[in-house]
Image: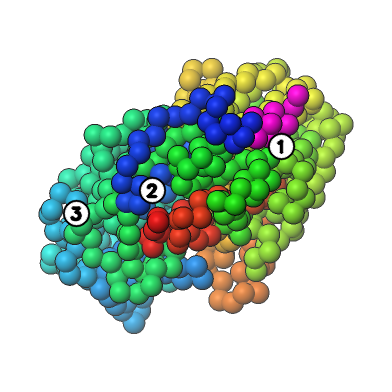
Amino acid sequence: MDRRRFLKSTVGAGVAAATGGLSMPAVAQGTAGKTLRFVPQANLANFDPIWGTQYVVRNAAALVWDTLYGIDSQFQPQRQMVEGEEVSADGLTWTFKLREGLKFHDGSPVLARDVVQSLKRWQARDPMGLMIKAIENELAATDDRSWKWQLKQPFPKMLLALAKNNAPCSFIMPERIARTDPFQQITEYVGSGPMKFARSEWVPGAKAVFEKFADYVPRSEKADWLAGGKRILIDRVEWVIMPDPATAAAALQNGEVDWWETPLADLIPVLKGNASINVDIGDPLGNIGAFRMNHLFPPFNNLKVRQAVMTALNQEDYMRAVVGDDDKLWKELGGFFTPGTPLYTEEGGAMMKAKDVAAAKKLLAESGYKGEPVVCVVAQDMAATKSMGDVTAELLKSIGMNVDFVATDWGTVGARRAQKTPPDKGGWSMFHTWHAGADCINPAAYTAIRANGDKAWFGWPDVPAVETEVANWFDAQDLAAEKAALGRLNKAAVENVVYAPTGFYLNYQAWRKNVSGVVSGPLPFFWDVSKA
């Protein structure tokens, strides 16, 4: 019996017999209407939203830490923690002011010096932050609620940088915490967001708990993604970690959990058949699957080896492994950006659709590949990464590569991929992840497309031709110029294989019908969500 039939039959049996035959997690009962139980995409193994870029960390951080601006569903930055801002006529001086009454969870007021130190820590890890840092004269508080950012040249996308939803977001922390080395993890989790992190109840691999922050003052505007009034209508959000999809599906159907962020596509027909459950696309902008290679060490420091992989890769194999047989849930890509959006291009993208194993073997032979092990670090506790990893193992073997398959968990992948040690000394050769379509509309928030060497995302590609076109896009004066820059960028990124996209796909989310306020978007938004 294959995986899909096994899961369907197991879940079906679990429903027929309530919980009989399934090992259900221990989920506390009581105060049902005040506690929302949520099954996240992955385990919250670490909790520093600046140190890494895992979406599960970003999603949790959005509850605990607030940002100066928030991106809305039209991708426009809106004021969040700030009362207002001014920019000088020459574009070189930005002045900001916090709104009144902002408090951290420890009761201390949010001050401008907290903001300044938080922004400095964020700058060190974020591509847009690094761009601002490179043209910065001074970033300093001017009083308790105000600060100035003085630049050497204008940066028109300042507010987008401070509002963007892709990790790392510019979350504001107390100054003492923000002084932590940005390349070391914080150990204290105090924010000013709408919920507090219940550190004493955190059990990595099992549970994470967030409690309503009574002193949070939401904005008066209606909530819209990360913008507007973040009104929390429940007392507690419990993240219940369930890596086994059959167990999660049965728990949702039996009412032991309320909301499942990323249900397995194979189980959607079963969930849709339950009259107590709503099922919908989680984010209409979808995701781009990623085969991420380490450009620092053999074998993927060799361009022809990277090209061999992209030439052989068949996106359909990956997408069917991830989303199943529903062709409406995936698309083949000839480019790195989100399909269906204004800047999507397939210029120079033929290699991404080649699916030519013979040509790949030829490239591998020309590369001088000597059989070095490819250390494939693959998270088994996430359906998408596990499925992609299984396809990759067969793909690499088919073109003659030596596969060292490291089956692990997503938390370990998150820690290991940050290491620049050689693959045979605790490092890695490749890993799988995905990038939210909302992050891949343009280069401003698209961390994974950057190719600025040591300052780039994990894998550290160094492709000056890509960076030139990123700069050209930022400088573009109209849509035509933006499209031209991204066409050239796409071509350079394909030719140099910054990474290998494995296809575009959509995910479902599912929640019980006694829960209201669930919306679609690039992350789960808990404000305005209530439970009867």
Q: Which residue lies furthest to the front in this view?
A: 17
Q: Which colour scheme is used?
A: rainbow
Question: In the rendered image, which quarter contains the N terminus?
Answer: top right
Residue 27: where, in percent of width, then height? 39, 34
Label number found at residue 104: 3
Front-lying residue, 5 or 311 = 5
Residue placed under numbered mark 1 in the picture: 321
Decide if residue 386 is on the left or right side of residue 97: right
Q: Residue at x 25, y 73 (%)?
A: 83
- Determine if the magenta segment contains residue 205: no
Q: Which of marks 2 and 1 is in front?
A: 2
Residue 58, compared with residue 151, is above or below; it is: above
Q: Can residue 470 be seen in this view?
A: no
Q: Provide the residue designation for mark 2.
A: 36
Q: What residue type is labelled 1?
A: Ala
Q: Does the magenta stretch include residue 9?
A: yes
Residue nearest the viewer, comparing 436 with 298: 436
Give the image location of residue 431, x and y in percent.
Answer: 58, 32
What's the distance in space between the residues labelled 3 and 1, CA to CA?
A: 44 Å
If the image is split into quadrants, where does the C terminus sit?
bottom left
Q: Residue at x 32, y 42 (%)?
A: 30
User: Which residues lie in the magenta part?
Assistant: 1-12
Label disc, if present, on residue 95 of the rendered structure: none
Label whose residue precedes the other's in the sequence (3 or 2): 2
Mark closer to the chain start, 3 or 1: 3
Which element type, helix, strand or loop, lies under badge 1?
A: helix
Which amino acid type is shown beneath numbered disc 2?
Answer: Leu
In the picture, residue 142 is in which quadrant? bottom left
